[in-house]
Image: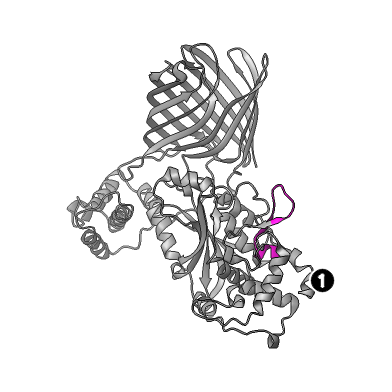
């Protein structure tokens, strides 16, 4: 203990990382982010690094025997023990030497050679996965690309079986769940993400040496029995994986820049932008991505036969199918089998005997003398190569013959007019979007504040019956019959379908509803419903147009009857810079007004 004090080990970065100490936001000092009491040896170890270090040293000399129910502290905290031993040089003859059989068996089963961070793309149907997800794969020494699915994975997630998406999101915002580390076979996560949720996977192989891998795994053992309070925006899956990885090297600072929020794609970007940290990147497309690539290479009659094969309404021995050249017939049969598996996996529907149908299709494929028709899928822009997730916009505009200046801030993440490179096309997820204006004849004011806005345009076709919709919650300026324009709280959204007749063009139609509340309204609110028709088109590279027409009729409260014709355009200048031109004609409470806004958007 005296040597530890003299060396100021409690102030060292290695000790702070092993205990997950971070500076307090307001008061002086630090606190440990682990909320499990068993993680600390000192009564105030969560807030006192020095006391925790000395209590840990004392525990290592404990004479308590190791048992199946209770590990010796040297075995419970192997990462702390290894680092303190390296710094202080323990005299083995003067301290217990437990066998640590549980840890040694666990470590031997992993047989780790390298570590790979895996990023799963966004999944809008689950509020907890709207930004994507990361996990850590532990690659064994005897595994290769053919057996990679047999590896283990380490992930961090909220411990809950909650099925209500809204309740999950709300509780996740305020630390309502315990976040825990889990060790699972990698194929379980690939099936969950790539097959059930149709999310592409990106595998970032880390350039860690054997001792660095060992440090991470020792610390993972320390974290597996513990829990953190789970917060959707900051202390989430990706943040705590960075906290685990940064123990590998004393100079690694991976979590320091994520004090307010940590998006999975941003945490991946931290790794790729650090020289010498990522060795290799592998793309693993989802089942739906592979099926979509197959279908894009087929003629309409081939697509129809592939669909009917998967539905069980066309026999694999049908004359029309057998009349095709061997390679084209193979492509149709393989696509039909993929479509059948997609339907069985996602639960969208299944033939009366899906297993028998799958066998019939595979037997028909085995009778064709043709190589595999599996398409080569180009990975495109990686998630970490897309635009940065925070955005600030400054512009000038005119409304009803009055000029104004506008400033907009969006902490996260992406909207459908942004450049899709590295993101899910047709998906919008934004939080805490704020717009403020200063009119030439008035004071500065908040124009809108939208804490949550989600918009999904998933194309429908004969294979995928995707649903599209949007939801926005927050405050925005709204005209009333009395002529006031209060900042009214409200919600609006829609539900419908989208179609993509060609690459670079999506059209959609949604049934819409909106509610606004403010004391300036008659009865204090207005409620309406109607429809929206829109299009999202990329005429050329870097130029995107979003146009829509919307009309709602009042159902209750003050008669408002809002309608709009809107044209939004974005011209990408660089990855993190764009010009945007918004034109609109709106009608609210019997009042019609035109607005034009030109703004420069910077992503950071």
Magenta residues? 15-30
Secondary structure category for the residue under label 1: helix
- Crowding near the residue tagged with mark 1, few <14, some 14–19, many ≥20 C-alpha atoms within 10 Å: few
Residue 169 sits above or below residue 516 on the image: below
Where is residue 106? Give x, y as percent: 51, 76
Looking at the image, which residue is at 52% across and 42% down?
420
Q: Is residue 256 left or right of residue 135?
A: right
Q: Examine the rendering and report whether any part of residue 14 can be seen.
A: no
Q: Residue at x 45, y 21 (%)?
A: 525
Residue 580 in the image: x percent, y percent?
59, 30
Q: Give percent across and percent down for residue 172.
A: 51, 48
The image quarter containing residue 397 is: top right
Q: Measuring 54% from the left and 74% from the top, which residue is drawn there?
A: 112
Q: Is residue 23 magenta?
A: yes
Snapshot quadrant of residue 465: top left
Render colour scheme: one colour
Q: Nearer the viewer, residue 211 or 436?
A: 436
Q: Give the quarter of the figure containing the N terminus.
A: bottom right
Where is mark 1, residue-wise?
Answer: 6
Front position in the image: 286 or 470 = 470
Near-viewer residue (588 or 276): 588
User: 63 above or below 313?
Assistant: below
Which residue shows up at 52% across the image and 37% down it?
415
Q: Is residue 320 magenta?
A: no
Quarter of the image with the C terminus is: top right
């Amino acid at each position: 203990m005296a040597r530890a004090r003299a060396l100021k080990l409690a102030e060292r970065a290695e000790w702070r990382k092993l205990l997950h100490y971070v500076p307090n936001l307001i008061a002086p000092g630090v606190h440990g982010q682990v909320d499990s009491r068993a993680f600390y040896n000192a009564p105030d170890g969560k807030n006192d690094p020095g006391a925790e270090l000395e209590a840990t040293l004392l525990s290592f000399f404990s004479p308590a025997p190791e048992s199946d129910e209770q590990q010796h502290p040297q075995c419970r905290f192997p990462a702390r023990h290894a680092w303190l031993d390296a710094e202080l040089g323990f005299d083995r003859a003067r301290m217990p030497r437990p066998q640590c059989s549980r840890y040694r068996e666990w470590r031997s089963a992993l047989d780790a050679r390298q570590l790979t961070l895996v990023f799963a793309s966004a999944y809008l149907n689950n509020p907890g996965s709207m930004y994507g997800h990361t996990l850590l794969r532990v690659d064994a020494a005897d595994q290769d690309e053919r057996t990679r699915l047999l590896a283990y994975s380490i992930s961090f997630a909220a411990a809950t079986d909650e099925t209500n998406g809204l309740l999950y999101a709300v509780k996740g915002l305020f630390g309502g769940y315990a976040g825990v580390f889990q060790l699972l076979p990698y194929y379980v996560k690939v099936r969950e993400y790539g097959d059930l949720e149709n999310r592409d996977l990106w595998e970032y192989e880390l350039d860690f040496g054997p001792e660095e891998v060992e440090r991470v795994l020792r610390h993972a053992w320390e974290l597996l029995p513990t829990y953190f309070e789970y917060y959707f925006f900051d202390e989430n899956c990706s943040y705590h994986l960075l906290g685990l990885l940064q123990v590998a090297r004393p100079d690694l600072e991976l979590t320091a820049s994520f004090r307010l929020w940590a998006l999975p794609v941003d945490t991946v970007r931290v790794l790729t932008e650090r020289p010498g940290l990522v060795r290799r990147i592998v793309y693993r497309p989802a089942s739906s991505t592979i099926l979509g690539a197959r279908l894009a290479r087929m003629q309409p009659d081939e697509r129809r036969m592939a669909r009917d094969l998967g539905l069980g309404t066309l026999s694999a021995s049908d004359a029309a199918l057998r009349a095709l050249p061997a390679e084209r017939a193979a492509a149709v049969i393989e696509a039909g089998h993929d479509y059948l598996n997609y339907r069985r996996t996602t639960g969208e529907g299944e033939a009366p005997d899906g297993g028998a149908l799958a066998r019939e299709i595979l037997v028909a494929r085995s009778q064709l003398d043709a190589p595999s028709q599996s398409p080569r899928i180009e990975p495109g822009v990686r998630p970490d190569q897309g635009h940065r997730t925070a955005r600030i916009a400054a512009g000038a505009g005119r409304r009803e013959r009055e000029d104004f200046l506008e400033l907009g801030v969006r902490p996260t993440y992406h909207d459908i007019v942004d450049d899709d490179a590295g993101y899910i096309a047709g998906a919008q997820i934004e939080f805490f979007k704020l717009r403020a204006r200063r009119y030439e004849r008035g004071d500065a004011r908040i124009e809108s504040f939208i804490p949550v806005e989600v918009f999904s345009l998933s194309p429908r076709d004969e294979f995928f019956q995707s649903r599209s919709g949007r939801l926005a919650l927050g405050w925005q300026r709204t005209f009333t019959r009395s002529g006031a324009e209060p900042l009214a709280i409200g919600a609006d959204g829609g539900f419908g379908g989208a179609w993509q007749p060609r690459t670079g063009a999506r059209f959609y139609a949604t049934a819409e509803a909106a509610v606004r509340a403010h004391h300036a309204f008659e009865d204090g609110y207005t409620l309406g419903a109607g429809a929206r028709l829109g299009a999202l088109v990329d005429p050329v590279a870097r130029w995107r147009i979003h146009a829509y027409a919307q009309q709602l009729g009042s159902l209750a409260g003050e008669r408002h009857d809002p309608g709009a014709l809107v044209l939004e355009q974005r011209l990408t200048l660089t990855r993190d810079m764009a010009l945007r031109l918004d034109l609109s004609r709106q009608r609210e409470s019997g009042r019609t007004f035109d607005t034009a806004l030109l703004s420069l958007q910077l992503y950071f």
